[in-house]
Image (cartoon, helix red, strand yellow):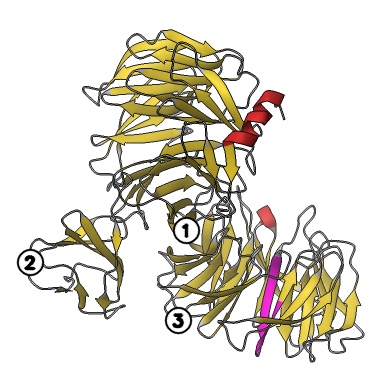
């Protein structure tokens, strides 16, 4: 890491860190990257994501959709559903318990830190058994779900990958450590009953009768007779396809379903454990099977590209495709303005959102073509996108509520990496420099000036100046009249520049492993690097609002810093770990929006008041009853409110203008309104009331 001694001296006196939180979770959108699955029967499928627990509505197998989620802040690796609760192996959070009595309104009940990463979980009676990745298994009393208590543990060196229970026995997959059976009849003093060694990684197990079926990666399926736990016997095997790896297994009736990575899903007849026979294979092409769950005649499996649904019940000898729900990852850029939001995800395109409230952005579309999208902004019913080697894309979308129409592509030279707007001027950052365009007519932007800077990495335009950082050139300042250089700091080279923002007389630059850099730009003719500040992880993005600087710090989430006195004096607060990989970031008012690879994360700054320039809608409590409802619902809002009802895409489905003469309103959906989640929003002066309603026909 490149640091100057004088810079370190300044850091000591100009940057104060406080161990207190400033950011809290407020909401999120587009969850992806899920692994764990549990289909307990009924209309809902539960999935483990990098951030928490998600719920798919699978009542219509042809149209499965992710409907709800509960943020926990860690990767959910495994799920066990018992009654009204979901028990989760929640990564760094340990055990997490979520109330699922209403699957469309989840509620986190409790968490319990086990001292290591939780990988597997199962429940037996009043006890949850949690498998840790390093030390062993933990026995937790869950007789009161709101207050779980750790009562015992059994150390298994090398850690565990999966656990299932039956009665007082825990069957533990230990990866390269093999397989073990632990008796927890006395929860405070578990006892090892039997072990099995394997030459390959044992990832997951399923049990049927007296037999445990191990998904033993390259070795294939190994069947253990566990009728005598102290004397395990191999009862049968089935080799993995040549060069293939088995990752997961589940059993229904006499059929085992196995995930084999990019080889697909395999089904086996296990009626005779000593003579397993393959029934069918559902092949994969460009993605891999991660986890499997079976409910009745439907098989659900997670992939890096989302959920897939297979029919395994119509014909036992034939697995057939039913549907898929794409949940793309790679979200790396986020832009917002007022109630509009855009994200870009590279080859997965751009996503549009409307925000009746800032807490729950409603996805309206995903736009893709053959291009790679680096960035996108919205202005006057048009989307302007940086589309790599293709240049600047112009798309039309009236209110970001509908799928956009492609209007034109403008070549700007080099690879387009970012786009920004100031008044009626567009600026495009390319590998060749910065291009300025006039957008009096948004459908025909006109190129005015080009400023060649061969290695431009990040920029920030204002009315008078465009600030550009380059690893070889340092910080370059351009005037906006003719895009000519007016000043530079040529000493600020060899930094891994990744993002920047300008607030007042200072520019704040995310510089990868070099942390956050602060430049004094009060005199544009002679900008100067004045501070270097370490960050918890690589600084990959930065934004500012209301006297705060927010840094996206990769695996460590978001680092908030309050500006005090001169702009180079900062007070740091605890970083908020989002659970994913923070990259793109922007802030408005009290809210910080983060492109976190697997989701759009919304954080709220609790240390700044509403009066500090807050421009997004303010949240107020609003009651609704009954909820869910099947014919009509009532709600409370101020007399004189304008009430609008939004569907899950952000489209207005009903409007009740100025009919709220009392504090109680009523909504009775028309026949054209389908079941689903709706948002009731009441506008009253400069205040907004909102709540979510679940309509079930």
At x 7% / y 70%, what residue is drawn? 661
For the N terminus, give its image quadrant. Answer: top right
Nearest the viewer among 43 and 218 is 43
Between marks 1 and 2 in the image, the one whose residue lies nearer the viewer: 1
Give left or right: position of 283 versus 181: left
Res 270 visible? no
Nearest the viewer among 16 and 576 is 16
In the picture of the structure, the residue carrying the numbered disc 3 is 101
Nearest the viewer among 10 and 333 is 10
Counting every numbered tag in the picture gives: 3
In the picture of the structure, the residue carrying the numbered disc 2 is 659
Between marks 3 and 1 in the image, the one whose residue lies nearer the viewer: 1
Q: Pointers 1 and 2 in contact (CB under 8 A)?
A: no
Q: Residues within 10 Å of mark 2 (few under 14, many from 20)?
A: few
Find residue 619 and name its label.
none
Give left or right: position of 659 versus 406: left
**Earlier sequence position, callout 1 versus callout 2:** 1
Q: Residues within 10 Å of mark 1 (few under 14, many from 20)?
A: some
The CA distance from mark 2 to mark 3 is 35 Å
**What secondary structure is marked by label 3?**
loop
At x 52% / y 71%, what residue is drawn? 46
Give left or right: position of 237 versus 36: right
Q: In this picture, which residue range is highlighted in magenta?
A: 118-129
In the picture of the structure, the residue carrying the numbered disc 1 is 25
**What secondary structure is marked by label 1?**
strand
In the rendered image, residue 443, in percent from the top left (x then y), is placed at 25, 26
Residue 635 lies in quadrant: bottom left
The CA distance from mark 3 to mark 1 is 23 Å
In the rendered image, residue 182, in percent from the top left (x then y), is placed at 83, 82
In the rendered image, residue 477, in percent from the top left (x then y), is placed at 45, 15
At x 24% / y 63%, what residue is drawn? 689
């Amino acid at each position: 890491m490149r640091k100057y001694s004088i810079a370190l001296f300044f850091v000591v006196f100009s940057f104060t860190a406080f161990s207190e939180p400033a950011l809290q979770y407020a909401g999120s959108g587009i969850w992806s990257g899920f692994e764990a699955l549990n289909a307990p029967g009924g209309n809902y499928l539960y999935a483990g994501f990098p951030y928490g627990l998600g719920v798919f509505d699978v009542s219509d197998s042809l149209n499965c959709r992710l409907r709800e989620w509960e943020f926990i802040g860690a990767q959910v690796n495994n799920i066990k559903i018992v009654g009204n609760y979901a028990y989760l192996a929640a990564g760094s959070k340990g055990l997490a318990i979520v109330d699922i009595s209403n699957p469309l309104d989840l509620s986190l009940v409790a968490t319990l830190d086990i001292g290591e990463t939780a990988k597997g979980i199962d429940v037996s009676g009043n006890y949850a058994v949690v498998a840790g990745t390093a030390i062993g298994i933990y026995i937790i009393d869950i007789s009161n779900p709101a207050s779980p208590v750790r009562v015992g543990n059994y150390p298994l060196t090398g850690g565990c990958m999966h656990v299932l229970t039956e009665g007082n026995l825990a069957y533990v997959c230990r990866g390269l450590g093999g397989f073990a059976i632990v008796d927890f009849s006395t929860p405070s003093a578990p006892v090892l009953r039997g072990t099995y060694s394997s030459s390959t990684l044992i990832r997951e197990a399923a049990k049927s009768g007296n037999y445990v079926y191990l998904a033993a990666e390259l070795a294939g399926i190994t069947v253990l007779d566990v009728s005598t736990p102290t004397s395990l016997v191999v009862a049968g095997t089935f080799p993995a396809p040549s060069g293939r790896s088995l990752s997961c297994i589940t059993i229904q009736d006499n059929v085992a379903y196995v995930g084999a990575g990019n080889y697909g899903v395999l089904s086996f007849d296990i009626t005779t454990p000593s003579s397993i026979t393959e029934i069918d294979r559902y092949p994969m092409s460009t993605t891999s099977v991660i986890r499997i769950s079976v409910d009745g005649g439907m098989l659900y499996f997670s992939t890096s590209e989302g959920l897939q649904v297979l029919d395994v019940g119509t014909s036992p000898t034939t697995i057939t495709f039913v549907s898929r729900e794409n949940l793309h990852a790679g979200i790396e850029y986020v832009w917002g303005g007022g109630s509009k939001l855009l994200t870009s995800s590279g080859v997965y395109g751009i996503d549009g959102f409307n925000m009746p409230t800032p807490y729950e952005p409603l996805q309206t579309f995903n736009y893709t073509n053959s291009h790679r999208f680096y960035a996108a902004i919205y202005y006057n019913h048009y989307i302007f996108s940086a589309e790599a080697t293709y240049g600047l894309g112009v798309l039309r979308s009236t209110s970001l509520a509908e799928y956009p129409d492609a209007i034109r592509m403008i070549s700007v030279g080099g690879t387009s990496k970012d786009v920004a707007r100031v008044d009626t001027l567009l600026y495009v950052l390319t590998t060749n420099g910065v291009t300025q365009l006039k957008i009096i007519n948004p459908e025909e932007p006109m190129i005015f000036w080009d400023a060649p800077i061969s290695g431009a990495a990040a920029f920030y335009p204002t009315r008078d100046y465009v600030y550009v950082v380059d690893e070889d050139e340092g910080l370059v300042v351009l005037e906006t009249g003719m895009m000519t250089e007016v000043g530079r700091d040529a000493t600020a080279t060899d930094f891994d520049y990744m993002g920047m923002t300008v607030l007042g007389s200072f520019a704040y630059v995310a510089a990868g492993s070099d942390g956050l850099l602060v430049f004094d730009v009060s005199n544009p003719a002679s900008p100067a690097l004045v501070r270097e500040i370490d960050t918890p992880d690589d600084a990959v993005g930065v934004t500012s609002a209301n006297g705060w600087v927010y840094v996206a710090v990769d695996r460590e989430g978001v680092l908030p810093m309050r500006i005090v006195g001169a702009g180079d004096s900062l007070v740091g607060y605890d970083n908020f770990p989002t659970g994913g990989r923070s990259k793109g970031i922007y802030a408005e008012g009290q809210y910080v929006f983060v492109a976190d690879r697997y989701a759009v994360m919304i954080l709220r700054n609790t240390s700044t008041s509403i009066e500090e320039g807050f421009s997004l809608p303010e949240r107020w409590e609003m009651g609704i009853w009954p909820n869910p409802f099947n014919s009509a619902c009532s709600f409370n809002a101020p007399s004189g409110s304008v009430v609008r009802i939004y569907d899950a895409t952000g489209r207005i489905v009903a409007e009740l203008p100025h009919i709220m003469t009392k504090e109680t309103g009523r909504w009775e959906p028309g026949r054209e309104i389908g079941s689903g989640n709706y948002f009731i929003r009441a506008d009253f002066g400069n205040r907004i009331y909102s709540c979510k309603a679940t309509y079930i026909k």
